[in-house]
Amino acid sequence: MLGAVEKAVAVVDDSETLSENVFRRIQSAIVKGEIAPGSKISEPELARTYGISRGPLREAIHRLEGQRLVVRVPHVGARVVALSHAELIELYEIRESLEGMACRLAAERMTQAEIDELRGVLDTHERDAAFQAGIGYYQQEGDFDFHYRIIQGSGNRTLSQMLCGELYQLVRMYRIQYSTTPNRPRQAFAEHHRILDAIADRDGELAELLMRRHIGASRRNIERHFQAAPSPTEVNNESQQQYSRPAFPRCGRQ
């Protein structure tokens, strides 16, 4: 695990704290799959690797818990999240509904300049070497992320907090994992262009429908993957159960 963490790229500002630095590096390694789902997070080992005290490290791990990338199990410790098939489908059902709404609002509220910038984002995606080779889709975060820009363009702060805050890195983790499915990168790119055209035409109803179909296609891709070959999260399920908790808390539970 540590080798993967050490390889994670970290561009660190001079003002960035040790905790922020470690948080960004571990976050990147988890999201990119360099630290596998279900892996144990060893505080002593990580503290030695980064040459920091437990305080900043625990702060970083606590933040990763807030992003649902790390779960802490009593008497076991912290581990990288490993969603079950059912939990992953729940996550995509949430995305399908909320990102569809965000897309409709974006069609109504994005400025022409923002729409032009979004088209530029897709131009960047098309030039990406992995995409050109047909082996993956461009997976940078924030302003270079097509979905992120649409959610921000919705102008709804609550939606942005949910989809670009609490759930964002967890969603990215699984988007990256399944983006290399054969033919899916090209299909996703074409779907993105159709969504953008609907937004540019100010057709909120069509934009919402296309986004829901787009995420639904990704969900079905995941379902086919699980049918063809169970993921590591479902192999030896009984031994895995002790390391997981519901990704989305049930009503009435704290």
Image (tube, helix red, strand yellow):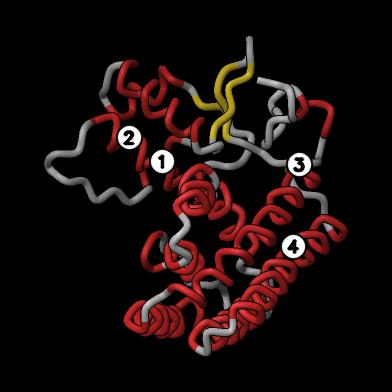
Dot label at residue 84? 3
Question: What element does badge 2 sit on?
Answer: helix
Is the residue 132 above or below the residue 83 in the image?
below
In this view, the residue farthest toward the right is: 227
Question: With 232 as the anchor, is 54 left or right in this view?
Answer: left
* Residue 201, image x, y percentages: 52, 89
Q: Nearer the viewer, mark 4 or mark 3?
A: 4
Question: What element does badge 1 sit on?
Answer: helix
Question: With 202 as the anchor, is 21 left or right in this view?
Answer: left
Which residue is tagged 2? 22
Cα distance in 3D space between marks 4 and 2: 32 Å
Give the total of numbered labels: 4
Q: Quadrant of the C terminus?
A: top right
Q: Amino acid at mark 4?
A: Arg
Dot label at residue 5? 1
In this view, the residue farthest toward the front is: 108
Callout 1: few (<14), some (14-19), or many (20+) C-alpha neighbours within 10 Å?
Answer: some
Q: Amino acid at mark 1?
A: Val
Which residue is tagged 4? 219
